Amino acid sequence: MVGADKWRNPDEDLPQDFEARRAENYRELRKPLDAAVFIDDLREQMTAELTLLSDQMPKLTWLDIAERKSGAIRLTAAEAQPEPRNLRRIKAEVQRRWGIVPLVDMLKEAVLRTGCLDAVTSVSGGGSLSPEVLAERLLLVIYAYGTNTGIKAVASGGHGHTEDELRYVRRRYLSAEAARAIAIQIANATFSARSTELWGQGSTAVASDSTHVRAYDQNLFTE
């Protein structure tokens, strides 16, 4: 049934010899065998951290907590920090080596290197669109949505595809399942090409935009 995995037995996700190698497995996880010890340590840590938070909050000049309709917690915006010198040097070196690379070219290169659109273009079957034309229109639609530029603005470019043609491809081919498959294939290719000497063997993925930074580790959805 759809959604049944949500209520599955977590014991089925463990190695089949987990019980036989319990001591070894717990040692690898750096956890005590006694559950009471684990709970006591966690309770002490939480109590200490919450006490520290309670003691420090009244001393924070940028935090105000009071009863108000708009919300009890109010934060004062932090002052902008100076840009690190090394970051400026990295930007200058990237521009010296490669110049200004349009984002759509980076998307095109990712498509060509990973073949992530193959699964979508293959469903065109005996339609009137060739796989090459369909791939071009899909790339433009993905760029339009991914950058919030919009299909109408993207259609005004000098690529020979009309707005109606792009909207048709969006409705016909770019489903949620297709978008998810494309994202997974690009993510897998990124992890495969990532230098382990620089980034290690970790499974952490980081995503950011102009206002938020999020990091995921051992997250089933991102996996």
Image (spheres, rainbow, N blue to C red):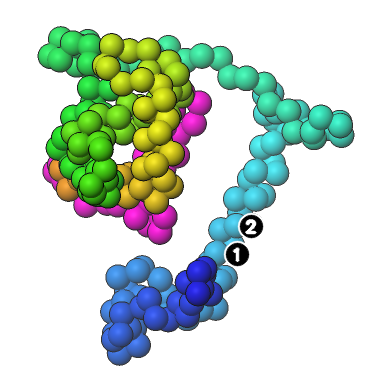
Q: Position of residue 96 (x, y in %)?
A: 15, 9
Q: Position of residue 81 (x, y in %)?
A: 47, 15
What residue do we see at 17% from left, 48% from top? 192
- Is the residue marked by circle 1 packed among few (<14), some (14-19), or many (20+) residues within 10 Å? few
Q: Position of residue 127 (x, y in %)?
A: 26, 43
Which mark, by number, is residue 47?
Answer: 2
Q: Which residue is mark 1?
A: 43
Q: Secondary structure at mark 1?
A: helix
- Looking at the image, residue 166 sits to the left or right of residue 196; the answer is right
Quarter of the C terminus within the rendering: bottom left
Q: Report if residue 3 lies within the magenta region.
A: no
What residue do we see at 66% from left, 37% from top? 56
- Looking at the image, residue 82 sits to the left or right of residue 24; the answer is right
Q: Is residue 191 visible?
A: no
Given residues 26 and 40, the one toward you in this image is: 26
Q: Residue furthest bottom?
A: 20
User: For the magenta stretch, what is the residue range?
Assistant: 195-223
Q: Is residue 44 visible?
A: yes
Q: Marks 2 and 1, Cα distance to the nearest angstrom?
A: 6 Å
Classify residue 118 by image quadrant.
Answer: top left
Q: Position of residue 155 (x, y in %)?
A: 37, 18
Q: Secondary structure at mark 2?
A: helix
**Mark 2 is on which residue type?**
Thr
Q: Is residue 150 above or below residue 173?
A: above
Do the numbered discs 2 and 1 sit on residues whose CB atoms are within 8 Å?
yes
Classify residue 42 by image quadrant.
Answer: bottom right
Q: Report if residue 212 lies within the magenta region.
A: yes
